[in-house]
Amino acid sequence: IINLSIMPSITPNVSFTNIAREIRCKWSPDNDKSSLTSCQDVLAKHLGDLKGDGRTVKRIVCGGCMDFKIITTSTEAAFAAFEEGGFAGEKDIIDELKGIDGVTDVETQTYTIEEM
C-alpha cells in the first residue's frame, strides 16, 4: 500500500513516486530503416547500465512519426543519484545516436511517471 501522505506532490491530488528520464530522436525510413536498426543497437549496448540500481527501461517506437524513445524510470528516492551519475551513460548514448546517419532531433526530458 502506498502512503500518499509521504509521496512528493505537484498539487494536492498529483503525487508521484517515480521519475523518468527520456532520450528520444527521430529515425529515417530510408535504407530499409537502417537508422532504426542502429538506434536499437545503441540501446542494446547500454541497456545493462540503464537498468542498474533497480531502474526499469521501456522502448517506444512509432512507425508513423518515426519516434525512437528510451524511457528509464527510477524511484524518486534514487533519482538524485541517477542524475548525479550522468543518467547511466546518457551522454554516450546521445553522442552515438547523433552519429547515426538518418537520426535527427536527439533530445532528453525528465518527468514523473506513475502506473494508474
Image: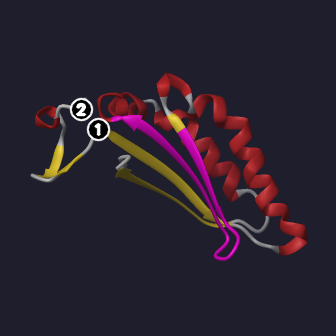
Q: Are marks 2 and 1 in contact (CB under 8 Å)?
A: yes
Q: Image point 85% across, 62% down: which residue?
A: 34
Q: Quadrant of residue 67?
A: bottom right
> What's the distance in space between the residues labelled 2 and 1, CA to CA?
9 Å
Which one is earlier in the sequence, the residue at label 2 or at label 1?
2
Above or below, comparing residue 9 to residue 1 in the picture = below
Q: Residues within 10 Å of mark 1 (few under 14, many from 20)?
A: some
Say what amino acid the circle numbered 2 marks.
Answer: Ile
Task: Reply yes or no: does residue 67 show up in magenta.
Answer: yes
> Left or right: where does residue 9 sit relative to residue 91?
left
Residue 114 in the image, given as x and y percentages of width and height: 35, 47
* Helix, strand or loop status at disc 2: loop
Which residues make up the magenta segment?
57-75
Q: Quadrant of the N terminus?
A: top left
Q: Image point 90% across, 68% down: which residue?
A: 32
* Helix, strand or loop status at disc 1: loop
Residue 21 in the image, given as x and y percentages of width and height: 45, 47
Q: Which residue in the protein does label 1 denote?
A: 17
Residue 22 in the image, given as x and y percentages of width and height: 49, 52
Q: Image point 67% across, 36% down: which residue?
A: 46
Q: Which residue in the protein does label 2 denote?
A: 2
- Characterize the magenta stretch by its predominant secondary structure: strand
- Numbered label tally: 2
Q: Residues within 10 Å of mark 2 (few under 14, many from 20)?
A: few
Task: Reply yes or no: does residue 70 show up in magenta.
Answer: yes
